[in-house]
Amino acid sequence: MAASRKRLSNKPVTGIVADSLARHVPPHARLILALSGGIDSVVLLHILCALRSQHPFDLQAVHVHHGLSSHADDWAGFCARLCESHAVELMVHRVQIAGDDPAGIEAAARRERQHIFSGLAADFILTAHQQNDQGETLLLQMLRGAGPKGLAAMAELQRRPGWRAAHLRPLLGVMRADLHAHALTHKLCWVEDGSNQDVRYRRNALRQQVLPLVELHFPGATTTLARAAALQADAAGLLDDLARLDAADAISGKRLDCAVLGALSLPRARNLLRYFIEYQGQPMPSARRLNEALRQLVEARHDAGVCLKLGAVSLVRYRGGVTLVPAAPARSAPVHWRGETRLDVPAAGVAVQLDAVVGAGLKRAVLESAVVTLGVRQGGERLRLHAGGPHRSLKNLMQELAIPPWQRERLPLLWCDGQLRWAAGIGLDADALAAPGEPGVLPRVVA
């Protein structure tokens, strides 16, 4: 029906893309198009190539080979031939996704794509999300109980934490039917992914079963949903503005002050905590998990320790402030040093550089005559920091230096024949220090 194909703009598809480029892309910018080989990205490639003469930019494409379909190699080959015909350089990235990934196949594939996109050297990464995708995303977020940020669905231009490039979606104002019409008019070829018909996936169920029924009773619903998402984006932007005002007094570096957080009204505190997590580039926890985190952070005693796991990070309260801490590396055995200048210490999640020096560091003769291992604390370690001074417990030394608890468990240590000789950030064993003019080895943590 004609009403269901109404767009947010009455311009031709090429004009909508041109307007998006004019709004966001300066001349001679570097663009990388995410090319799946499906109709949407094929149409966007065709339009971008047509616009290069009037809006100059450097264009490349990237194809993510998920390996989930028996046709995956064929799709990569199709994209290679298509890019060659347009004189566009194509990068192909292969990823492996486990069928039993805890996130689910859809989410795991999206995670791997975004990981690749985040590292691409460009000014803009372009994806071919269109207006129907926007409506589907809004409904999915509503059914998950999302707030304004989630209901805003997808922005035309988005700057993602950790991405080198901005994320641009120039087709958000275009209906899927109009892309199909453009492809037929210009006799374009594309590939069809059969999994898009599999209604076991929630988005496909919405696309194939739910939205057609909604459009039957509410003509133009897809456009209306996209408009609703835009309104939610406005609301989310205002909430971010409010959070930034609150953050001026509450956030210092990567620390959120719990006293300031607790002084805010509950909705405002929740908004600030949500902003703090997103500001660190972490995915948003569920509303239930966020509310529980807020309750524990503001109700705990001033000296109480709180640690809540949020996926790959933990929300930790320490000395009246809250910090997001990466999950600790899996426990692993100490590693042996055999003269290397650099040694990975998996248990600490870092590498240790062992520089050859003279008159400083640990005596090389002591290290070369012993079994040298590097790892993390097991408990009971002691260290003498000053000649003639006492051996002090590592636990007390870390407390005096105010080393946060989450750093104590991954602090790199070095032993010689089982005796602690070095603790990163604390010091060297005074009994093994190199004398002036004596060869030494100076350990230090490197990224």
Image: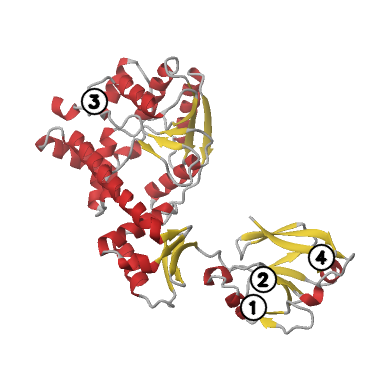
- Please, what is the three-letter code of the amino acid marked with disc 1? Leu
| Helix, strand or loop for disc 2 | loop
Foreground of the two, 175 or 322? 322
**Residue that mark 3 sits on:** 9
For the point 36% across and 35% down, the residue is 193
- Please, what is the three-letter code of the amino acid marked with disc 4? Ala
Q: CA distance from mark 1 to mark 3?
A: 66 Å
- Please, what is the three-letter code of the amino acid marked with disc 3? Ser
Where residue 162 appears, x then y in whole percent?
A: 48, 46
Foreground of the two, 412 or 38? 412
Mark 1 neighbour density, 10 Å: few (under 14) some (14–19) many (20 or more) = many
Check whether the beta carbons of the residues at disc 4 and disc 1 lie within 8 A of each other.
Answer: no
- The quadrant of the rendering that contains the N terminus is top left
**Residue that mark 1 sits on:** 394
**Residue that mark 2 sits on:** 426
Check whether the beta carbons of the residues at disc 2 and disc 1 lie within 8 A of each other.
Answer: yes
Instruction: Answer with mark 3 or mark 4, whichever residue precedes in sequence.
Output: 3
Foreground of the two, 213 or 30? 30
| Helix, strand or loop for disc 1 | helix
